[in-house]
């Protein structure tokens, strides 16, 4: 493995992590809700009375944030190293995993770990281990 020192940004990464943690903490303090994307989007599929607008606002904020960011700095170049079929299968597997795991990486990894949830610790370790095994298999066993 080689580290790309030109694009190595520990301070920006740390700041981004702090902002994500702060936003998740404020979200749970103000709304009493976990900032897990799969739960927020899932709630849009079967909305309850008075539960729709904050979910829509959250998703709109996620989608418009990159355009606001590019006012201050150029957006990084996006490079996708997979084909459409691979992305569709991967997305389907992630969707199934979030249903079986009762949440996604943002819900368990950011919010659940911050609340010291044992279930979120197991889920996050499962996400990470699965990712490690998948990358190893694709890059070393199937290459």
Image (tube, rainbow, N blue to C red):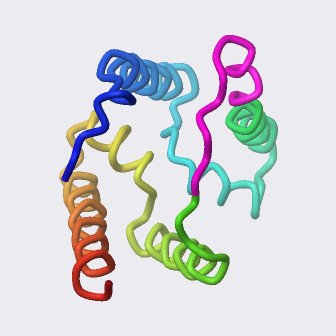
Q: x and y percent of residue 3 in the render?
A: 24, 40
Q: Quadrant of residue 97?
A: bottom left
Identify which residue is drawn at 63% across, 83% down. Answer: 85
Work out which quarter of the rendered image holds the C terminus and state it: bottom left
Rendering coords of residue 1 (x, y %): 19, 53
Image spot of residue 40 (x, y percent): 63, 49
Image height check: is 76 above or below 48? above
* Residue 34 horizontal side relative to residue 8, left or right: right
Q: Residue at x 58, y 53 (%)?
A: 79
Residue that sits furthest to the bottom in the current view: 142
Residue 6 placed where, x, y %? 36, 27
Residue found farthest to the top: 72
72 inside magenta stretch: yes
> Residue at the spot x=33%, y=79% of the render?
138
Q: Is residue 76 magenta?
A: yes
- Type of secondary structure dominating the magenta stretch: loop
Q: Nearer the viewer, residue 105 or 48?
A: 105
Residue at image location 77% in from the left, 55% down from the top = 47
Q: Which residue occupies the foreground of this view, 61 or 116?
A: 61
Looking at the rendering, the stretch of residues picked out in magenta corresponds to 65-79
Answer with left or right where residue 41 lies relative to residue 125. Answer: right
Given residues 80 and 28, the one toward you in this image is: 80
106 vs 41: above or below? above
Q: Please give the count of numbered marks on the rendered protein.
A: 0
On screen, residue 107 above or below 7: below
Q: Is residue 94 left or right of residue 141?
A: right
């Amino acid at each position: 493995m080689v580290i790309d020192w030109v694009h190595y940004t520990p301070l920006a990464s740390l700041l981004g992590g702090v902002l994500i943690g702060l936003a998740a903490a404020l979200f749970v303090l103000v709304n009493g809700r976990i900032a897990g994307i799969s739960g927020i989007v899932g709630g849009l599929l079967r909305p309850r009375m008075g539960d729709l607008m904050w979910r829509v606002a959250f998703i709109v904020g996620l989608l418009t944030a990159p355009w606001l960011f590019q006012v201050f700095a150029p957006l990084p170049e996006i490079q996708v190293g997979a084909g459409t079929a691979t992305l569709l299968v991967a997305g389907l597997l992630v969707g199934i995993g979030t249903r079986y795991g009762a949440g996604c990486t943002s819900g368990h990894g950011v919010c659940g770990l911050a609340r010291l949830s044992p279930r979120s610790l197991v889920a996050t370790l499962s996400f990470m281990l699965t990712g490690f095994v998948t990358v190893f298999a694709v890059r070393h066993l199937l290459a």
